[in-house]
Amino acid sequence: MTAILHHAGPHHDAYWLVKAAGELDIATLPLLEHDLHAALVRPAVPRLIIDLRPVTFLDCAGLGLLCRVRGRVRRREGWLRLVYAAPVTVRLFGYAGLTDAFPAHASVDDALQGIPSAARPVRPFRPPDPRRGPPRGC
């Protein structure tokens, strides 16, 4: 996993852009945590955009980190916006019930403006009913 931290914007401390790539799991989280910490220790109100489009794998450890960072940012009256569009990532946030907390943004520009993408909502996961037997066609 690689993470690249960029300070961007026309004004000092306008926002931070973190581009994550590769696998984001328990083994690779320390690098991303380090970069996010660098953005969060600034005295200004935190405004973070995390671009997850190049991420090839995201597990519950990654979701947990995003939730913790979101909490820290909100306590300081800032915002955290995520850029993602891959169907598997959209489904993951939907199954975890996190699409309201982390709406998808199609691009960094959309995230900066706070314009969520029109990604289709994901129905919550429901395990099969054992009383109905195995699915047909198996």
Image: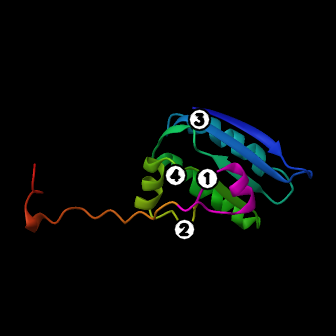
Q: Quadrant of the N terminus?
A: top right
Real-space CA distance between mark 3 and mark 1, rounded to the nearest whole angstrom = 16 Å
Comparing 64 with 6, the one in front is 6
Magenta residues, start to end: 104-118
Q: Which residue is mark 1?
A: 106
Closest to the camera, between mark 2 and mark 1, is 1
Circle 2 Cα neighbour tier, 10 Å, few/some/many (<14 / 14–19 / ≥20): few
Residue name at image x 12 percent, y 57 percent: 135
Assign a secondary structure to mark 4.
Answer: helix
Residue name at image x 70 percent, y 43 percent: 18
Assign a secondary structure to mark 2.
Answer: loop
Real-space CA distance between mark 1 and mark 4, rounded to the nearest whole angstrom = 19 Å
Residue farthest toward the right in the current orientation of the protein:
11
Q: Measured from the top left, where is residue 58 in percent x and y?
A: 48, 43
Circle 3 Cα neighbour tier, 10 Å, few/some/many (<14 / 14–19 / ≥20): some
Q: Report the disc number at residue 100.
A: 2
Real-space CA distance between mark 2 and mark 3, rounded to the nearest whole angstrom = 23 Å
